[in-house]
Image: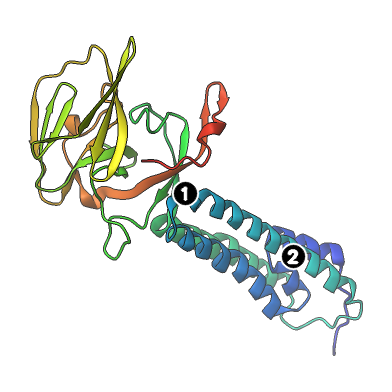
Amino acid sequence: MNHIKPRHPLMAAGMSLILPGFGQLYNGMVNRGLLVFMAFTLVTLPLVLWVTFSLPTSMTLALLILTVMINAGIWIYGIVDAWKTAKNNENYILKDWQLPAVYLLIFLSAIFYFVPSMSQYMRTNLVESFSVPSVSMAPSVLQGDILFANKNYNCVGCAQAAKRGDIAIFINPNNRTQYYIKRIVGLPGDRIRIEGHQVMVNSVSLSKGDVDETSNVTVITEKAGNIEYQVQYNRRFNKPLKEFIVPNGEVFVLGDNRNNSKDSRHFGTVPLQDVVGKASQVWMSRSEDGFRWERLGLVLK
């Protein structure tokens, strides 16, 4: 016997609020519910992120903001559509599968399996955010910066290989539960020579000769590969000569804040397999004095 049970608009809207497409399922519109859910979780975010890393880095922040807006639009559409449909379904005939246990199973599967799996895939293969806790990469990267890191990097089939000048995210050699952020200055086979403020790679100085000195800090412009960046030293910095040869399958990394960085001068070279991403853009930055609005969307180099 068919069981007529009106749909409640607030119930439908509330279910769509907690999970896009869930209200459509409550209204018996399985296909529409799946479309809303798939658009929210599968199409919008991965597609826009894929486009993000196929286009110049300067467009990353704008496209990610667009992603949020599109997702919000899909969510709102799902809520409004579920509410309107339920309002017009006073003589709704309840389907056999529409049981509280089925709703609960679908909800738990989406929240604890599908969405986390999708999020993990994106963090592993597309983009991940990292918070910078130290000053080791100043002046390029500041303490309190929150970065986008491109994870489609330094792996088989990835769009980008590790190269000199990249700001790399890698596993801390002394604590594999942590990540470090440093700049790659040496590739496999490179001969690195460090003396005072001079860094030589295969007998070629990274310094371009541009020096800016204050009472406490010396800022030098370096160029590694095609990337120019600034590094800083304490005026009293004076370290003995060091020479390294980068082994096969490894890279040599340095912090831009040369006095305040634990890097390959201390823990040695880093296996390429431990380099997991490339820092590409600042999406938020905060100091003790508040937000650094001028760093919002800053493309790193």
Question: In terms of sequence position, does the residue under pointer 1 or pointer 2 come before the other?
Answer: 1
**Who is closer to the viewer here, 219 or 12?**
219
x then y, percent, for residue 218: 29, 18
Q: Which residue is mark 2?
A: 77
Choose top left, top right, bottom left or bottom right for residue 19. bottom right
Measured from the top left, where is residue 210 in percent x and y? Answer: 27, 26
Residue 100 falls left or right of residue 130? right
Residue 74 appears in view: yes
User: Is 235 placed left or right of 88 in the picture?
Assistant: left
Which residue is at 26% across, 63% downward?
Answer: 156
Q: Visible in this render: residue 171?
A: no
Q: Which residue is most to the front? A: 209
The residue identified by callout 1 is 58
Q: Residue at x 56, y 51 (%)?
A: 62
Q: What amino acid type is highlighted by mark number 2?
A: Tyr
Of 87 and 253, nearer the camera is: 253
Residue 52 x %, y %:
47, 58
What scheme was used to colour the molecule?
A: rainbow
Q: Secondary structure at mark 1?
A: helix
Please report the residue visible at 55 percent of the width from the left and 55 percent of the height from the top.
63
Q: Quadrant of residue 39?
A: bottom right
